[in-house]
Amino acid sequence: MPVTAAFDRPYDLASFSGAIAGIPVIAEPLQVRLKSRDFFWYSPLLKDALGDKQAELVVCPRDEADVVRVAAAAARFRVPITPRGGGTGNYGQAVPLAGGIVLDMTGLDAIERVEPGVIRVQAGAIMENIDTALRPAGWEQRMHPSTKRTATIGGFVAGGSGGIGSITYGGLRELGNVLAARIVTAEPEPRVLELRDADALAINHAYGTTGIITALEMPLAPLWPWLDLVVATDSFAQAVHLGYRAALADGIVKKLLTPLAWPVPGYFRHFKSEFPAGRSCLIAMIAEPSLASFKAVVAAEGGEITYCAPTPEGSGARPLYECTWNHTTLHALKVDRRITYLQALYPADRLEASVSEIATQFGEELEPHLEFIRFGGRVTASGLHLIHYSTPERLNEILALHEARGVSIANPHVFTLEDGTRHKRADADQLGFKHRVDPLGLLNPGKMRSFVPAGR
Ligand SMILES: Cc1cc2nc3c(=O)[nH]c(=O)nc-3n(C[C@H](O)[C@H](O)[C@H](O)COP(=O)(O)OP(=O)(O)OC[C@H]3O[C@@H](n4cnc5c(N)ncnc54)[C@H](O)[C@@H]3O)c2cc1C
């Protein structure tokens, strides 16, 4: 997929650098290159398209005032800005397509306040650190990606979709999962806007194209003592059925239900003893008071609990959630570089039948991996199946065959919002909002394909 030159415009980096004097920057070429990359290489197609893309300079604001200065100078000298948190995005979201600067937001990492059920935090805070700070007060984040230990909250809201916790609270796109966002606009005289409730959807999963997020207000969940569990099953269908029963059991407090078909558990080299060879499984995170009820579901459906221990925390810990969501693909890639993946949303009204159709249609070419979630108020599943890659044509055919069976695809092999986000996208006029906050098209240019800057 060629990167078009439509957004390639001249800019004046030397004058920009002069205008932001005093704000820390990184110009060392290897560092700039590393900070221009994310996990786009999960996709063989994006690997080819984005491998040579990078910024010219990394700018590291220390506070919101620095962000405002950078935005003003960038607008004045037409310098593209690609915001960056932990750089764990998957579709080249944080890869600059038009040079310019990477704006490293990790310096803005303060927790501004914690109130019952709400946290106000700067966008560059690492999500693991947020949970650590919340724990003494008996709260935790409603959901987090499996990259919790390296991802920032700003990167999650701008680039992620959901994860551990989404079986209870749905994805980030559901109203109420982001309470407010404070953003800086990309204009010669930047504005600082507070977007509340539905208005905050404008920056949700927009890849940083609709404002630089400096702070977020996020809703919290009560802290539970979590248990990691592996339930071995005789078939993938049994793991799905068992997971579905647990997902529908409203009284069971859970955070994660992940059915995996063998051989997927075999890719977890650090977790061998937990996953019996040759067996499909369900990975679960269950609140300790709900363990007996969960065991009753397992007994009724015929699974075997092969691992049960408190979810470990802290450095060196190996929580089982790091085998789920997009970590599953990472483990597989470490074993076989030709594996890639897809992102599917199953129809809630015929979930098990639809999963079964897909799981059997592609033979060994597709290795099934599901995540149970709530979506629009209903329990369903997201499919992050592993694909044994052969050609671009076949990959696109596999995606099309899903859609033909009524399974929605958010294509992880493209870098534009319009083509990649689909069911993950918030219900908001992000294009219209972009015209108001980034009229020159300087924020992550090329990612919002439908945007054309005024005057062009
Ligand atoms: C192994 C692995 C597992 C993953 N698991 C999950 C998962 O469970 N769920 C999930 O949703 N995603 C998952 N992801 C994707 C990614 O890790 C998450 O979306 C993560 O939250 C991104 O945070 P980050 O700080 O690394 O963002 P980055 O990658 O740095 O940025 C992501 C996007 O947000 C923009 N951005 C970053 N900060 C700001 C800001 N302050 N203002 C405006 N825009 C900003 C960037 O420009 C970019 O477009 C996974 C990725 C990997 C590699």
Image: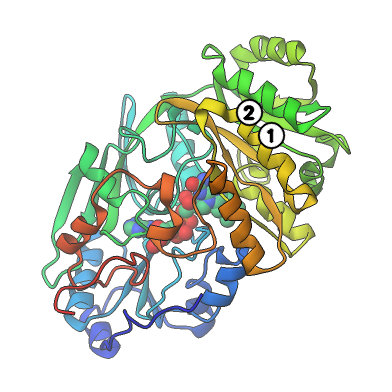
Residue 210 vertical position relative to residue 246 in the rendered view, above or below:
below
Relative image position of residue 233 (x, y in whole percent): 80, 27
Which SS class for mark 1?
helix
Which residue: 53% across, 57% down?
A: 412
The amino acid beneath tag 2 is Glu
Q: Say if residue 342 shows up in the picture.
A: yes
Residue 258 vertical position relative to residue 391 in the rendered view, above or below:
above
The amino acid beneath tag 1 is Ser
- Give the labeled residue for mark 2: 352
Which SS class for mark 2?
helix
Q: Quadrant of residue 71?
A: bottom left
Which residue: 28% across, 83% down?
A: 17
Relative image position of residue 85 (x, y in whole percent): 43, 59
Q: As drawn, which residue projects farthest toward the right?
A: 277
| C-beta proximity under 8 Å, tags 1 and 2 | yes
Q: Pick the residue in front: 410 or 221.
A: 410
- Give the labeled residue for mark 1: 356
Relative image position of residue 46 (x, y in whole percent): 55, 69
